[in-house]
Image (cartoon, helix red, strand yellow):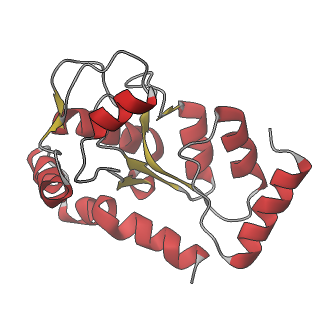
Amino acid sequence: VLSPFGVRVVEKMNELGMIIDLSHSGKNTAMDTIDRSRDPVMFSHNGAAGVFKGERCITDEQLKALAEKGGVIGISGVPNALSDAKRQGIKNWFDHANYCVDLIGIDHVAIGTDINWQDHVAIHKLSGQFGEHLAAEYMEGIENPAEAYQNVIRCLVSEGYSDQEIEKIAGGNALRLIEKIVG
């Protein structure tokens, strides 16, 4: 739950035209922020708890509140954040994206891979972020930023998403949010 200071921070961020990203927030903080913010918010790099109960996965309740406010969830491509399978990849990303589209609609889902050129799993091992259980060493098809977007787009095409739907997921929804809040 937001403290009085937290409420003032949300109000000030709204006043300044800042996007509020709740990707690393706990459920209660996120729900309170969604409720108190006059503007839509985002989860920029998460997954759906309805698919996998991971540390960074958002509950249906949070997703529905996000969508009701006009917000966007970016689906992560970080190994071990969307699955605990030994082999993980683009299909895991798709399962989360498709679940969110079915639950809250195409206008609230985006690509939010949160990947980099470094070894994400090594970073997680050092930080202990996902505990000791790190099943996969990488996400097949999403190993680096150069291939991630093209492979995600290919996946969406192969799964039957229309050009208009892909445009929304590939950047249109995020751009709409940015234009609404930032101007």
Q: Position of residue 82 (x, y in %)?
A: 33, 30
Q: Position of residue 88 (x, y in %)?
A: 19, 28
* Quadrant where the image shows the C terminus: bottom right
Write the residue at 19% across / 58% down. Answer: 149
* Label total for image: 0
Write the residue at 29% across / 34% down. Answer: 122
Query: Could one spot residue 177 in this view of the protein?
Result: yes
Q: Nearer the viewer, residue 6 or 96?
A: 6
152 vs 83, left or right, is left
Quadrant in the rendering for residue 180:
bottom right
Query: Residue most toward the right?
Result: 4
9 vs 138, left or right, is right
Query: Residue most toward the front?
Result: 126
Quadrant in the rendering for residue 111:
bottom left
46 vs 62, left or right, is left
Residue 69's place in the image compared with 2, above or below, is: below
Q: Nearer the viewer, residue 115 or 179?
A: 115
Write the residue at 39% across / 31% down. Answer: 126
Q: Position of residue 118 (x, y in %)?
A: 25, 48
Residue 121's place in the image compared with 162, above or below, is: above
Q: Nearer the viewer, residue 15 or 125?
A: 125
